[in-house]
């Protein structure tokens, strides 16, 4: 069985009717599953998770792009998360029986199709990047939809597929291949965005923090607090517990605390066991490495403060 | 008052008579002080620390270079530490009332003088580097004195000042400007070097840790315990307290604790105040930024666990 995880992000997180219409081509398909879609009202963004045979995903993804063009106008889009396109980013992630090189080929195939069929400019990013500057998605996306009109005309930012002009309502998209990353957010007991920003700086690589962390502040208006939102690009080198505990240490100076945390999309089982081993060792409890997903979930909620978490967030629940 | 710290390193650490003769032009000068010189027999190298007005240092430094030429023949030099010149490296470090840009100008001025007057090729390094490859001193110095004869003739390694040939007995020198670095060691309540190694990996950049930390394990045989030994290359981005607290968090899993810590050489007052502000905020005590060096020392010993520490370890004690 060849399994990839594919995680398209769309710039719509509020209008459920639109979201359902856009993702409908990805549902009930043979060869892969739509595991979840997670609309976020504050981000105004939905993270969609597919798991299965990448060969079977390409044609439904092309239809999905078509619907996003019809339903999303980036000229009127507002949200907390940086974005440059109606479909903002599509990563292919090797999970089982498939190489990174093959994932890069699927990324190129999808890029080729959407640029030709829908006139959307595509940047290949992460492991699929053709130049160093495009390995980093934040680097590509800098300037966002509003700045991309000009940026894409610079020789340095000529897209890898399509013409050097944004689609007038869709914008541009990044398609690529990467290792599994963990989208992890830490909820703070404050609505002060400055605190979230200071904490993000402590952990993120670009400000002197940990090597494999991208992080920024976000205001969750609906929930009434801020969070540090991050990608953990290598959970073996920068395990979840270490980031969480560093934030818990640093936040003490602001006289507030960490209330909870959340995983967006899926995460590999190993990322949980690696972190639980730390807490079990601290508490001098022997760690049972044969623990099932239900028990792992229970302990992760306790130690890592995961909210809205279930075994269905763990990749191994599906494979 | 404009104050820089200037730390020339010479490739002689055994013959005290030679060393005294070479550093004599740096003693009892108006406008700056020779704070210390630390000969190391194994390294066969002496680290000299000057503090004061850089304007006043240039002419004595030129004389100091002249004496190093007279007394040191690199063709017969042997020692543990990598080196490429009789005077191996001269960094200018901004301390007070002076910018990094000005330090770079002083580095260039010294480089200009010694290349013209003494026919020594000079590489500008660290913040003074003109190209990326020369930001790293180890990169410049690779091949050492013995390899430099050939290396300096490569177009890529043409010196910034002087001809592309080494001085036959002196070799070549790196002159530059950099932030103050802090040599910081954390003592662990164990003699297990594996624990020190695991902890070093957590914090050091090269293993995924903090961006400005170089770290490794060390066994202190006399004291009977291990330590994590490190350089903090940018204490503003990676403050002492954050590194110490991260180690205290991580070490919990090994069931041992941090017993004390030490500063090797000097550190700027600001590095202490930045860290004390964290602890005072955690303890909800107002921080008095006019605190004297004696009080800073007392609190640093309490919160940062410094051992063998006194106000004389603080650069501002001399300025």
Image (cartoon, coloured by chain):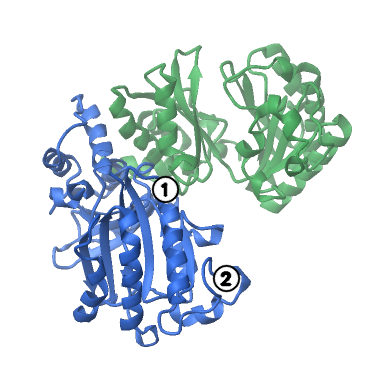
Chain colours: A green, B blue
- Mark sitting earlier along the chain (2/1): 1
Are discs 2 and 1 located on one and the same chain? yes
B240 left or right of B223 in image: right
Most foreground residue, A246 or B130: B130
Which numbered tag is attached to residue B100? 1
Q: How crowded is mark 1: few (under 14 residues within 10 Å), some or many (20 or more)?
A: some
Residue A25 image point, x, y percent: 78, 25
Displayed quadrant of residue B58: bottom left
Most foreground residue, A127 or A133: A133
Task: Residue at 74%, 31% (x, y): give it.
Answer: A150
Task: Residue at 45%, 84% (x, y): give it.
Answer: B168
- Residue lying farthest right? A117
Q: Can residue A187 be seen in this view?
A: no
Q: Is mark 1 on a helix, strand or loop?
A: helix
Task: Residue at 42%, 49% (x, y): give it.
Answer: B102
Q: Mark 1 lies on which chain?
A: B
Displayed quadrant of residue B107: bottom left
Task: Residue at 32%, 40% (x, y): give it.
Answer: A279
B139 left or right of B293 in image: right
User: How far apart are labels 2 and 1 at the CA level?
Assistant: 24 Å
Q: Mark 2 lies on which chain?
A: B
Which numbered tag is attached to residue B158? 2
Residue A48 image point, x, y percent: 65, 28
């Amino acid at each position: 069985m060849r399994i990839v995880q594919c995680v398209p992000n769309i710039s719509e997180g509020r209008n459920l009717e639109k979201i359902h219409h856009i993702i409908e081509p990805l549902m009930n398909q043979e060869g892969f599953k739509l595991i979840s879609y997670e609309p976020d009202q504050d981000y105004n963004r939905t993270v969609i998770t597919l798991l299965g045979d990448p060969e079977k995903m390409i044609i439904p993804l092309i239809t999905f792009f078509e619907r996003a063009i019809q339903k999303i106008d980036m000229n009127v889009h507002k949200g907390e998360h940086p974005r440059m396109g109606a479909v903002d980013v599509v990563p292919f992630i090797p999970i089982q029986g498939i190489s990174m090189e093959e994932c890069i080929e699927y990324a190129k195939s999808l890029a080729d199709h959407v640029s030709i069929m829908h006139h959307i400019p595509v940047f290949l990013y992460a492991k699929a990047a053709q130049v160093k500057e495009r390995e980093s998605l934040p680097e590509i996306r800098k300037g966002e939809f509003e700045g991309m009109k000009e940026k894409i005309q610079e020789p340095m930012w000529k897209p890898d597929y399509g013409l050097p002009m944004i689609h007038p309502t869709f914008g541009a998209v990044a398609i690529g291949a990467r290792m599994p990353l963990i989208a992890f957010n830490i909820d703070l007991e404050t609505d002060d965005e400055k605190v979230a920003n200071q904490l993000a700086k402590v952990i993120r690589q670009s400000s002197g923090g940990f090597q494999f962390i991208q992080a920024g502040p976000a205001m969750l208006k609906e929930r009434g607090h801020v969070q540090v939102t991050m990608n953990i690009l290598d959970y073996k080198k920068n395990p979840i517990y270490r980031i969480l505990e560093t934030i818990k240490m640093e936040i003490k100076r602001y006289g507030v605390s960490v209330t909870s945390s959340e995983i967006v999309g899926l995460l590999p089982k190993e990322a949980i066991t690696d972190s639980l081993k730390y807490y079990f060792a601290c508490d001098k409890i022997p760690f049972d490495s044969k623990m099932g997903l239900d028990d792992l979930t229970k302990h992760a909620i306790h130690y890592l403060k995961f909210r809205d978490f279930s075994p269905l967030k763990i990749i191994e629940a599906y494979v």
